[in-house]
Image (tube, rainbow, N blue to C red):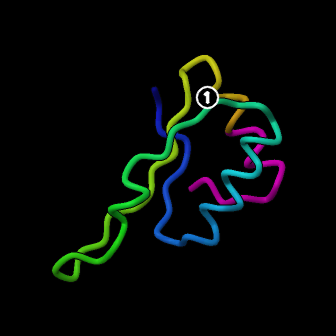
Amino acid sequence: MQEVFRTLDFGEAAVIKSLLLSARIEFYVFDENSAAALGGICEPCRFMVLEDDFDDARAVLRDAGVNLA
């Protein structure tokens, strides 16, 4: 699996989920439930896709205007 996106913003995470689901790209979100502040340090949600889907996933997010820095 390869990381295609990460965010600390739960609203943005919902949008990313919706985009990937709409494109029928399988994904897994790492650290979704542990993205709360712990000692002042936040862990971002990391969206992971299969390597074969990586380019397609990035294209879907880029076409939707998501900043992929």
Question: Residue 36 vs residue 27: left or right?
Answer: left
Q: Quadrant of residue 41?
A: bottom left
In the figure, 18 relative to 39: above or below?
above
Label 1 Cα neighbours within 10 Å, binned few <14 / some 14-19 / many ≥20: some
Amino acid at dot 1: Phe
Residue positioned most to the left? 39
Percent position (x, y) of residue 34?
32, 62
Residue positioned most to the top? 52
Residue marked by disc 1: 54
Q: Is residue 33 magenta?
A: no
Q: Quadrant of residue 43?
A: bottom left
Question: Residue 17 vs residue 59: left or right?
Answer: left
Question: Residue 56 vs residue 22: left or right?
Answer: left
In the figure, 58 relative to 9: above or below?
above
Residue positioned most to the front? 33
What range is drawn magenta here? Answer: 58-69
Residue at horizontal 55 percent and vertical 23 percent from the top: 50
Percent position (x, y) of residue 19?
77, 49
Secondary structure of the residue carrying tag 1 is helix
The quadrant of the image that shows the C terminus is: bottom right
Percent position (x, y) of residue 7?
50, 63
In the figure, 9 relative to 27: above or below?
below
Q: Of 35 and 62, which appears nearest the observer?
A: 35
Residue at horizontal 60 percent and vertical 61 percent from the top: 13
Percent position (x, y) of residue 28?
51, 38
The quadrant of the image that shows the N terminus is: top left
Residue at horizontal 49 percent and vertical 55 percent from the top: 6
